[in-house]
Amino acid sequence: MVLVVDDSPDSLSLINDALEAAGLEVLVALEGRQALMIARKMRPDVILMDAIMPNMDGFEACRILKSDPELANIPVIFMTGLTETEHIVKGLEAGGVDYLTKPIKPQELLARIRVHLKNARLTNSAQSALDSTGQHLMTVTPAGITSWATPQTHALLARARVDEFVLQAVIAPQLQQWLGQPLQPGHSIRFHDLSYPLTARFVERQPSGDTLIKLIDGERPSGPMLLRDQLGLTERESEVLYWIANGKANREAAEILGMSPRTVNKHLEQVFTKLGVENRTAAAGVALRLLTVE
């Protein structure tokens, strides 16, 4: 997954098209502060960062990113029309791993991305890889006992007033029974006997025998629901926009939603009209402004 940060719609469209054609998932942000919010929630594999932007420039955004232990390993490639040596040095000193000058050449960009993705994957630990796949992940033993959890999971459990006693006495027995069934990715269980609505979603069985699950906050509206309510979309339109904003190509969104790519295109045309935008990149930008609000 690649996060592209640029305040120019033309640049975003060019880069988005090139990356999607290469089979890469794309997220977009229009300035540094928004990029940081998206990075914390979506954990991209690499960030393409414009240097000069309003509100927060790419240099400052990169410095903040590199100061966060959970995000510091994400490689940042700077993009700018500035070619002066001082700006190149400034980008590298901020924590960037590479530097491209505009106009961007798609083939060169793809080659740089592949190199840095490979390097990042070689240096990241297995736990870092798990951290990057979602906000509220945890692994549990066949008995339902928690063996590992992301910091976001611990925060959600605290918000739900789930302490160690509740984990052992209430949640573990329900997980143990649920995990004894044949499960497929996406299968979920809603916990009962809690004062706060929590759901666990099955992700995968691990070689160790533990199971990776994702916790769902029952009091937070789902992404599609939030887009539907805030943007005045139909249920299907909001679902299509949600997956497009999460970097899915039309074909992938169609498979997830059980519809044809042609139907996805028709829904997107309605979304463009309702949002007053001209393309999927601009529509994704509108959606991400809502989805990344803290």
Image (spheres, rainbow, N blue to C red):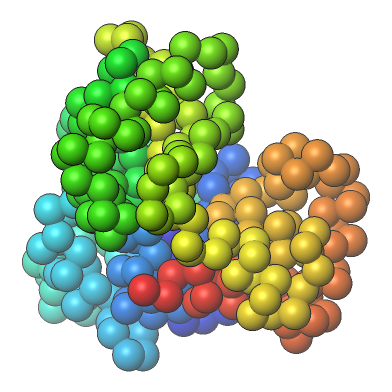
Judge whether 13 appears above or below 127 on screen: below
Residue at image location 32% in from the left, 78% down from the top: 33
Give the quadrant of residue 188: top right
> Is 53 left or right of 237, judged from the image as shown?
left
Residue at image location 17% in from the left, 39% down from the top: 164
In the image, farthest residue toward the bottom: 55
Give the quadrant of residue 11: bottom right
Picture quarter with the C terminus:
bottom left
Q: Nearer the viewer, residue 216 or 260?
A: 216
Judge whether 114 appears above or below 182 on screen: below
Q: Nearer the viewer, residue 154 or 3?
A: 154
- In x, y percent, where is residue 125? 19, 30
Q: Nearer the viewer, residue 272 or 147?
A: 147
> Is 163 left or right of 253, judged from the image as shown?
left
Judge whether 136 appears above or below 80 on screen: above
- In x, y percent, where is residue 148? 21, 31
- In x, y percent, where is residue 128? 23, 37
Is residue 126 visible to us here? no
> Is 179 left or right of 209, judged from the image as shown?
right
Residue at image location 24% in from the left, 73% down from the top: 61
Residue at image location 39% in from the left, 64% down from the top: 38
Judge whether 236 appears above or below 169 on screen: below
> Is 92 left or right of 225, judged from the image as shown?
left
Q: Nearer the viewer, residue 89 or 64?
A: 64
Is residue 247 visible to us here? yes
- In x, y percent, where is residue 41? 37, 58
How many labels, in total? Answer: 0
